[in-house]
Structure formats: C-alpha cells, structure tokens
Image: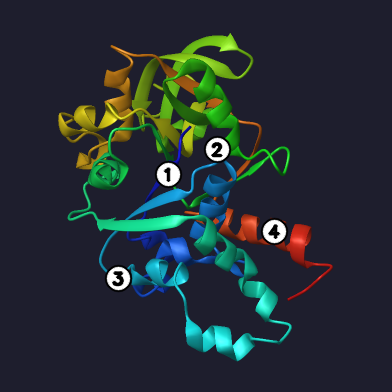
Amino acid sequence: MIKKCLFPAAGYGTRFLPATKSIPKEMLPIVNKPLIQYGVEEASNAGMTDIAIVTGRGKHAIEDLFDNNRIIEEAVRGSDKEILLEETNRLMELCTFSYTRQKQMKGLGDAILSGEPLIGDQAFGVVLADDLCIGEKEQHNVLAQMVEIYNKYQCSIIAIEEVPEEETHKYGVVAGIEVEPGIYHVKEMVEKPPAGTAPSNLAIIGRYLLTPDIFDLLRDTPAGAGNEVQITDALKRQTQTNRVIAYKFQGRRFDCGSVHGFVEATNYFYEKYFRQTPV
C-alpha cells in the first residue's frame, strides 16, 4: 500500500500578491478551509496518512494549521463554532506530519527531490495543493482512483486532463497508447511545449504516484524549461526503462493557482456545501 504523500509547498504564489507576501498560497481558503487541507483530506481518504511537506521561508502557517492551538480551542469550546475544527482535528489524529525545506526555488522536480529524506525507498503520492480536485463520485477521489491503477500496473502514475490546444503551452503534455479507457502507456512527454508543437492536448495536473527510482533520475536531471528541474523531464527518462501510466481521471480540477480558478472553486464549494447551511 502507498502510505506516504508529498506536498511541495515552497513556491512563492506570486499570482496572488500582495496576499502571498505574508500568507502561504497553500493556506489561501476556499470558503473557510485552506487549500492544503483539501489536499491532505484527499490523500488520507486514499490511504496515505504519512504526510510529508516541503516548505520554504515564511511557510510556518502550514505547520501551525496541523498543530494544536489551545487559545482558539478554548475560545470556541462549547460554542457552535467548535464543530468547525472537527475536520482539522480528525486529520491531526489520523495523519503524521513531517517537514523539510527546499533550500532554493529550483522547480517542482527539485522540490520533490528535497522530500526524499521524508519518503525513503517506497512509492509515494504527490499533491500540488493549488490543483484542487474532486472525484466524480464524492467518496472516490482522484488519488484513490490512481491508487487502484497503481495496484494493477505497479509503476508511476500521472493524472491528466484534456485542455484546449491553445493552452497546452502552460502544461506538461503527454502522448501515448491508450491501453484501457482513459489509461495511457506514455510514449512522449514534454514540459510547456511552444504553441503548436504539443504532441496532444493531454495535460499533466498536480497529482502523481511515483516509484522511488524517481529520486535517482531527478538527481541526474539538468534544469529544463524555465531553468528549473522539471519532474516531467525525469518522468520522460523513466519511460525509457520502466512503464509510466497517464490517467484521465474521473472528476473535476480547479486551478487555484490562478485567480480565475480560485474564484471558480470558491463559488463551487460555497454553492455545494455552504449556501444552505452558512457558517
């Protein structure tokens, strides 16, 4: 079973300045819950209860979220606000949390490599918290779907979705052979291809299940697009010796790293969960 999940959370979140000058982008709330909590809930519901978080300077609020705060707990005890802490407290009981820092902002691949001491020699999940995902079925989230595929194929799994061709330059893009409906044996992979050159419109989103050999591949992966170490480049090398599967997940993804996607997610979750029972 895959028990560990890595959260790269060292980025600056510059698209949300000035808020992210003092608030980690992973702590921005969708209604009343921080983005990273949605991701930890998804991971834990998929059986990954060992949560490893790669942070950077100014990210202490993430650690504070998953820690006791006696002052606030005492302030709401016995009131109708006490229930608002139940989900966070449940995660604190269910999961273990460990942290390390990415020393330099050198890309997602480097952030994942920075988490190696927390992961060890085992397969693990990776969640980018600003990609907020919901499963087509509420109790069958994206990571849970990917775990089922991993159990069958025993290789790295990456989540993908179709995007308009004019947007492929924003993503890592894959192409391959469809071996089952929505499941592709990856043959080609490129990070942020120039407009008009993408091999398909199948874009990688912020959910991965990775086998531990990815760490050695990342160590030997030079800087690529944006002069950063790209996980896409390491995965492309992995396809040369092992199978890599791309999975067109069943559900919906909100790009909360963009203002438009963040507002879209806020409206969706408010209408679905809060409109009839406002906090």
Dot 1 falls on a residue whose secondary structure is strand
Q: In which quarter of the image is residue 222?
A: top left
Kind of residue sitting beneath label 2: Leu
Circles 1, 2 touching at the beta carbon (< 8 Å):
yes
Q: Crowding near pointer 4: few (<14 within 10 Å), some, many (20+)?
A: some
- Measuring from the top left, give residue 146's x and y in whole percent: 54, 30
Which one is earlier in the sequence, the residue at label 1 or at label 2?
A: 1
Q: Distance between the residues labelled 1 and 4?
A: 24 Å
Kind of residue sitting beneath label 4: Phe
Give the label, 1 or 3, closer to the camera: 1
Residue ID for mark 1: 5
Mark number, residue 269: 4
Residue 47 vertical position relative to residue 219 in the rendered view, above or below: below
Residue ID for mark 3: 58
Which one is earlier in the sequence, the residue at label 2 or at label 4?
A: 2
Mark number, residue 71: none
Residue 170 vertical position relative to residue 183 in the rendered view, above or below: below
Q: How far apart are marks 1 and 2 (CA)?
A: 10 Å
Which one is earlier in the sequence, the residue at label 4 or at label 3?
A: 3
